[in-house]
Amino acid sequence: MAHLGACPASTPSRRYNGGVEASPLRRHRRLRRTEPLRALIRETSLSTRQLVYPLFVEEGLSGRRPIPSMPGQDRLGLDALAAEARDLRNLQIPAVLLFGLPRDKDDRGSAAWDREGVVQQATRRLKDANPDLLVVGDVCLCEYTSHGHCGLIRPDGGVDNDATLPLLAETSVSLAQAGCDVIAPSDMMDGRVGAIRAALDVAGFAELPILSYAAKFASAFYGPFREAAESTPQFGDRHGYQMDPANARMALDEVLTDIDEGADMVMVKPALPYLDVIRQVRDAVQVPVAAYNVSGEYSMLMAAVQNGWLDEARAVNETLTCIRRAGADIVITYHAKQWAARR
Ligand code: PBG
């Protein structure tokens, strides 16, 4: 066919100056010549205002205790929170995501909705020290149940989805009463967004937004978190309620269902192996999309940094920028403080 192979009609427009190829590559080189030029045409930007910093608060702990599998991250005692809140203000980090380590666990996870629970107390302390800090309350039972599952366990050993919903709703209301600005259910029970929305509305919190962990995959990358939060299941696994990493269509379906039930923002978690899912979700919905750069993603990068194999500043900036490029409006990351400190 005439348009295949050498095509005399199109050749002249591809050449200039006596036969030097005017390939697109050359145009790109010109635009990459200096940093001001590169900055002028940069498509994706990352700003501290888009970051959420996860915090582990341990009941009964005084001060801070390093988390061995997450170099640079600590568990905090309640008495360490005021200083932390001031630190975050100085770094201009707008939001924290709170996880609690209660002193006592039981088979129902009742410390999760205790008015004097560790996250409820932590929320009040953080807000006292820094009223502008957005406190996002993670809602799940796995840190509070003796068996480590995210819901109630039936006698046959399975998770009782529907019986768990009122407990998640009660936890959400108690976090709202403590002063949380956003409620973030991470349990992956079906129907929990609707149940939480209804309970918040009845309790007078109709204006409190829900950030749903909508596409949360059953991931190996939560390993360090489970050590940090002491939330490893004592039997079985979470494959029944968290998503199969192989499924993107199902992730979209979960996202749409959560929005239908009243989610104001949705999350994809983890981030790095799921950048395609972030992009698909961003293209499919009109609500803000958050991505959770989880513990295992943090730990593997930091392990390489500690070995001298990666440059921390560059690797972190690239990681977070690329999560934004994939379509995340909000990035939840343990790197937040280090990244913000280098601005
Ligand atoms: C609780 C929860 C988990 C994470 C956030 N909320 C762990 C899990 O599902 O086992 C993981 C966060 C991380 O790895 O950084 N359900």
Image: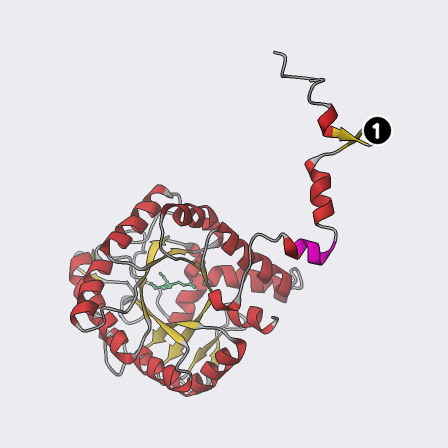
x, y percentage for residue 280?
A: 41, 45
Residue 333, can we see it? no
Q: Is residue 90 left or right of residue 175?
A: right
Q: Is residue 294 above or below residue 129?
A: above
Q: Is residue 7 above or below residue 138?
A: above
> Type of residue at label 1?
Gly
How many marks the image carries: the answer is 1
Residue carrying label 1: 18
Ligand 1: image quarter: bottom left
Residue at the (58%, 74%) spot, across then down = 341
Q: Is residue 243 above or below residue 141?
A: above
Residue 37: within the magenta?
A: yes
Secondary-structure class at tag 1: loop
x, y percentage for residue 54?
A: 43, 70
Residue projecting furthest to the right:
18
Q: Is residue 296 left or right of residue 41?
A: left
Residue projecting furthest to the top:
1
Residue at the (24%, 62%) spot, across then down = 151
The part of the image, by quadrant, that contains residue 159 is bottom left
The part of the image, by quadrant, that contains residue 292 is bottom left
Magenta segment boundaries in residue numbering: 34-38
Residue 168, can we see it? yes
Q: Is residue 340 left or right of residue 284?
A: right
x, y percentage for residue 7?
A: 69, 18
Majority secondary structure in the magenta region? helix
Q: Is residue 4 above or below residue 166?
A: above
How many residues crowd around disc 1 within 10 Å: few (fewer than 14), some, or many (20 or more)?
few
Q: Is residue 196 left or right of residue 67?
A: left
Residue at the (17%, 66%) spot, across then down = 166
Residue 110: within the magenta?
A: no
x, y percentage for residue 312?
A: 62, 64
